[in-house]
Image (tube, rainbow, N blue to C red):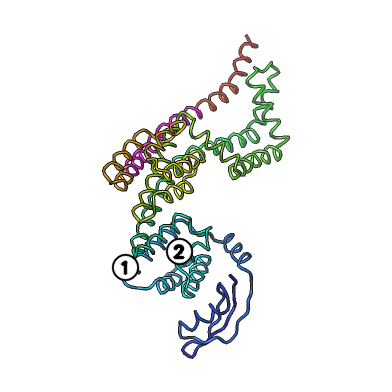
Amino acid sequence: MSFYKYKYIKEGKEYEETKEFSDKASLYGAVRSENGSIVSVKEVKSEKSQIKFFSLRKKIKTQEIITFAKNLSVMIDAGLSVSRSLSVLSKQSKNKKLIAILESIGSSVNGGETFSKSLDAHPDVFSSLFVSMVRAGEESGKLSYSLRVISDQMEKSYALSKKIKGAMIYPAVIVSVMVVIGIVMMVYMMPTLTETFKGLNINLPLPTRVIIAMSDFLIANLLLTVGTLIALVLGFFYALRTQKGKNTLDYVTLHMPMIKNMSKEVNAARTARTLSSLVSSGVDIVSAIGITGDVVQNHYFKDLLNKAAKQVEIGELLSVSLSNSNGNLYPVFVSEMLSVGEETGKITEMLDNIATYYESETDQKTKDLSTIIEPFLMILIGIVVGIFAIAMMLPTYSLVDAIQ
């Protein structure tokens, strides 16, 4: 894949554009399909450098992929070909990276490649779940249905993730503001009080001496302190990007008292929703389990689903494979409902019911978590303010005792 800067004539007017194509032949074909003729062509940048530049400037959001799948489904239902639909969608998009990718996919499809294979060439944008469902839709002749299902699945998963992140943002903001206010008070307010206390010529209580010592340290090492805090925050986020950091976070979320049950329910909802979407689109159950293992984020669930795929392949029931999990990762309700679905031949409906149930449960628990966290934060703020107030008031009592 390369980017080309080219001039062409269309309806008597000359145009100049820079777009991505697999080769010059694809470029010429695309221009001819629009009733244009090439004047000049020049390769300007490699795919890697150009995509990297676009990635830094503007990423492709999940919502854009959801909208793309929905619109493409509607267009195919209306009778438009895939290549024509991609051309229309690329013109409607305002994201330059997405435009380049859609045009690349369109060129590939026009060149005779399947739509799913063309999508698979962009794994950073289209997940294995997306590609597999499109492939299943192509094979079954129900591409528009598969696109509609994947857009619904992605939308529900995205909404679930947003609710969880939203519940975590509030306490993070409050704690951050508390730290900033604390540093400002120590650096700008405490020096005045310190001078006042020193003028009293009394023995200051221990809490007051500790607060003054902290203030003196911050004033003397302000840049070091701020730099250390920033380094800790950046180090934390960097650690979360490493495999060891991710594994540690997975362990914590599955064992922390307040969130462990919600973590299991979130993964249960994501697993059931993904499996339901894949199976309903015609993907075989073994492949569907394997793809779902790539979709879930917690590595404990990934490992379990990979083992379940192997067991189902040799004839084991999915409900049994999940119920035998170490640590009871999936709630009992999941395996029981799956068992009913396997017995009645309605596994897709049961998976959809499981997903709906746990999405509802997670939604309610995120609201409850926000309600529970708020008084804890108020208590924490009260304790911090109380300690500071007491440390500032104690010297006054010491002065009264000295006068008496």
Magenta range is: 354-381
Q: Quadrant of the C terminus?
A: top right
Q: Quadrant of the N terminus?
A: bottom right
In the shown orientation, is residue 220 left or right of residue 120?
A: right
- 392 relative to 328, above or below: above
Magenta highlight on residue 368: yes
In the shown orientation, is residue 198 left or right of residue 332?
A: right
Magenta segment's dominant SS is helix
Label 1: which secondary element: helix
Q: Residues within 10 Å of mark 2 (few under 14, many from 20)?
A: many
Q: Nearer the viewer, residue 97 or 315?
A: 315
The amino acid on which the numbered mark 1 sits, given as a three-letter code, is Asp
The residue to which callout 2 is attached is 116
- Residue 54, horizontal then vertical, whole percent: 57, 64
- Residue 320, horizontal then vertical, whole percent: 38, 36
Q: Nearer the viewer, residue 284 or 206?
A: 284
Residue 367 appears in which quarter of the rendering? top left
The residue to which callout 1 is attached is 77
Which residue occupies 39% across, 34% down? 323
Furthest residue in direction front, as rendered: 314
Furthest residue in direction bottom, as rendered: 12
Q: Nearer the viewer, residue 199 or 121?
A: 121
Furthest residue in direction top, as rendered: 404
Magenta highlight on residue 174: no
Q: CA distance from mark 2 to mark 1?
A: 18 Å
